[in-house]
């Protein structure tokens, strides 16, 4: 048996640093460890602050999903303060959050994932030259328009929120400004331009309605060959290329998923509570484990720090969560190897498990039966998982599929706005309370837990989608989702392991960094290179 250890450091995310270590036996990854190399500590900063500080601080956690952070922070305080939300405010919050996600979909595909499809590793494919023509950074025929047009949806966010990123226009009781007819008209025009010029013209090669008529994997395969426009669209080409180079055959992960859900029916969440949240959601929450669906219950969430650079080894619910960092050198002596905690979920009858978050998790939740009339019901990815299983290809397709569904929601919400109704109701500023707010950022489940005592923040815990996915092993030694997804990945050339990049980027990790590869037996550096290099 030939064994090689690779230390990929750093394997960047969109923001922050992610290090990965893998063991490769006979050309296949047999073990993997993910390490978040950057300490955040904003939970510590928020202790003792004014309750509304989370509206300012948490959007600064991320420069690409700040609107998602604001959305869940506002709902956490709505719950803690027992506010009332007018319907218009809920719609504006939905529109803004969804538009931020819409900009991430093409940007994540073209700028972070598809450029690796031009890697020389795939040069033997008969489709390789076309991949290079389309997806080469800056000069690719699809790369430029995709990245440029991705900015359009956040123009809509800025219309309603005043700016993007780092807006703080969502406040307890609603939003701070009422939109005008000009705002809605301009937003609609921008959205329709994005739909016609990128979503339908370049990505789908067909109408939104035609794509959303696909209900099974067989439907998708038939759709590709239905006509030339669909066959040669970026979506049609992506699927054909993935099937040719094998991106449908690795990167499976745990096969267990969590979605906390997002977007609310305005009439059903006028007075936000933890108990009433699930029934009011449009994009449903849910847990899928061992082939069975379960309702999502925030009370079953835990954060394990056994292998994280924090004091102790206990697993706490976030309301009782602790963020007590230690020196990493001391932590490594105790077997700790990451600044990320290990989020886990206590699945009924199955016990505590790592769960994958992200677009695929949302699509699995949408396939669950018994959706209410206002809720998303979409069987497509339930059938895809049952037919071909999860993979790099399926995970990326799930994200791209959401462009059409989310566009349709935003278009409907713009039409529903009543510009003569209120958009804010003054909030009672309670001195004590607990609040939970969650959403689905582009990359997955994102949630805040806030504890108020005597008018100040006594505890504030944030669990991000990246934490769900890159968290290290827990106290039972169970790998996190990306650690599990890397296992089984074939690596043709240990000195240039682009396959690791495919897996990580399918979770929307950002790999624009230098990689160092080492021989596991001798410690000799094999090479130094940059993942994602074009031909």
Image (cartoon, rainbow, N blue to C red):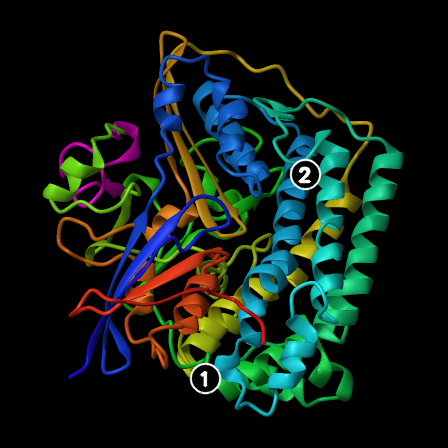
- Mark 1 or mark 2: name the one nearer the start of the chain: 2
Give the residue pinned by disc 1: 246
Quarter of the image containing the C terminus?
bottom right
Q: Mark 1 falls on what kind of element?
A: loop
Which residue sits furthest left?
334
Looking at the magenta stretch, what is its main secondary structure?
A: loop
Left-right relation of 244 to 237: left
Crowd band around label 1 with a 10 angstrom C-alpha radius: few (<14), some (14–19), many (20+): few
Crowd band around label 2 with a 10 angstrom C-alpha radius: few (<14), some (14–19), many (20+): many
Q: At 47% from the left edge and 19% from the top edge, which residue is drawn?
A: 81
Q: Nearer the viewer, residue 254 or 79?
A: 254
Gap in angstroms between the C-alphas marked 1 and 2: 42 Å
Tell me if I can see residue 75 in this picture.
no
Q: Is residue 523 above or below residue 89?
A: below
Left-right relation of 4 to 278: left
Give the residue pinned by disc 2: 91
Tell me if I can see residue 351 in this picture.
yes
Q: Which residues are magenta?
A: 302-322
- The image shows residue 449 at horizontal and vertical percentages of 38, 30
Quarter of the image containing the N terminus?
bottom left
Q: Nearer the viewer, residue 466 or 501?
A: 501
Q: Is residue 64 above or below residue 496?
A: above
Q: Mark 2 falls on what kind of element?
A: helix
Q: At 58% from the left edge and 58% from the top edge, which residue is drawn?
A: 108
């Amino acid at each position: 048996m030939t064994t090689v250890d690779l230390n990929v450091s750093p394997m960047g995310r969109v923001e922050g640093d992610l290090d990965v270590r893998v063991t490769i036996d006979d050309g296949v990854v047999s073990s993997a460890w993910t390490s978040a190399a950057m300490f955040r500590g904003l939970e510590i900063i928020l202790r003792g602050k004014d309750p509304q500080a989370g509206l300012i601080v948490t959007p600064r956690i991320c420069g690409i999903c700040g609107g998602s952070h604001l959305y869940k922070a506002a709902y956490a305080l709505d719950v803690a303060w027992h506010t009332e939300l007018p319907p218009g405010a809920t719609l504006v919050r939905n529109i803004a959050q969804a538009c931020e996600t819409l900009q991430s979909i093409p940007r994540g595909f073209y700028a972070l994932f598809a450029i690796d499809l031009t890697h020389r590793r795939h040069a033997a494919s008969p489709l390789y030259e076309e991949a290079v023509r389309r997806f080469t950074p800056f000069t690719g025929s699809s790369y430029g328009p995709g990245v440029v047009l991705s900015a359009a949806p956040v123009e809509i966010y800025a219309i309603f929120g005043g700016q993007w990123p780092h807006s703080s226009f969502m406040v307890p009781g609603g939003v701070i400004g009422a939109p005008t007819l000009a705002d809605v008209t301009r937003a609609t025009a921008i959205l329709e331009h994005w739909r016609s010029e990128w979503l339908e013209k370049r990505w789908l090669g067909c109408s939104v309605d035609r794509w959303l008529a696909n209900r099974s994997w067989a439907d998708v395969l038939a759709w590709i060959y239905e006509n030339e426009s669909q066959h040669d669209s970026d979506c049609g080409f992506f699927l054909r290329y993935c099937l040719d180079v094998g991106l449908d055959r690795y990167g499976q992960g745990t096969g267990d998923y969590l979605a906390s859900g997002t977007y609310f029916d305005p009439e059903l969440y006028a007075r936000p509570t933890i108990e009433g949240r699930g029934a009011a959601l449009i994009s449903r929450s849910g847990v899928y484990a061992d082939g069975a669906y379960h309702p999502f219950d925030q009370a079953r969430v835990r954060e394990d720090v056994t292998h994280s650079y924090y004091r102790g080894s206990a697993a706490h619910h976030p309301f009782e969560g602790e963020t007590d960092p230690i020196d990493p050198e001391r932590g490594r002596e105790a077997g700790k190897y990451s600044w990320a905690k290990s989020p886990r979920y206590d699945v009924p009858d199955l016990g505590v498990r790592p769960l994958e978050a992200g677009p695929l998790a949302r699509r699995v939740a949408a396939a669950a039966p018994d959706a209410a009339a206002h809720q998303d019901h979409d069987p497509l990815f339930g059938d895809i998982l049952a037919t071909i299983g999860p993979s790099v290809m399926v995970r990326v397709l799930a994200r791209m599929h959401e462009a059409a569904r989310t566009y349709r929601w935003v278009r409907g919400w713009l039409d529903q706005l009543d510009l003569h109704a209120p958009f804010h109701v003054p909030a009672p500023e309670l001195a004590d309370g607990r609040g939970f707010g969650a959403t689905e950022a582009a990359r997955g489940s994102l949630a805040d837990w806030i504890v108020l005592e005597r008018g100040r923040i006594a505890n504030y815990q944030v669990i991000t989608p990246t934490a769900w996915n890159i968290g290290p092993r827990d106290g039972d030694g169970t790998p996190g989702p990306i650690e599990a997804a890397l296992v089984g990945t074939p690596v043709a050339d240990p000195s240039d392991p682009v396959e690791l990049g495919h897996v990580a980027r399918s979770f929307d990790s950002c790999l624009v960094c230098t990689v160092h590869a080492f021989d596991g037996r001798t410690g000799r550096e094999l090479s130094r290179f940059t993942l994602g290099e074009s031909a």
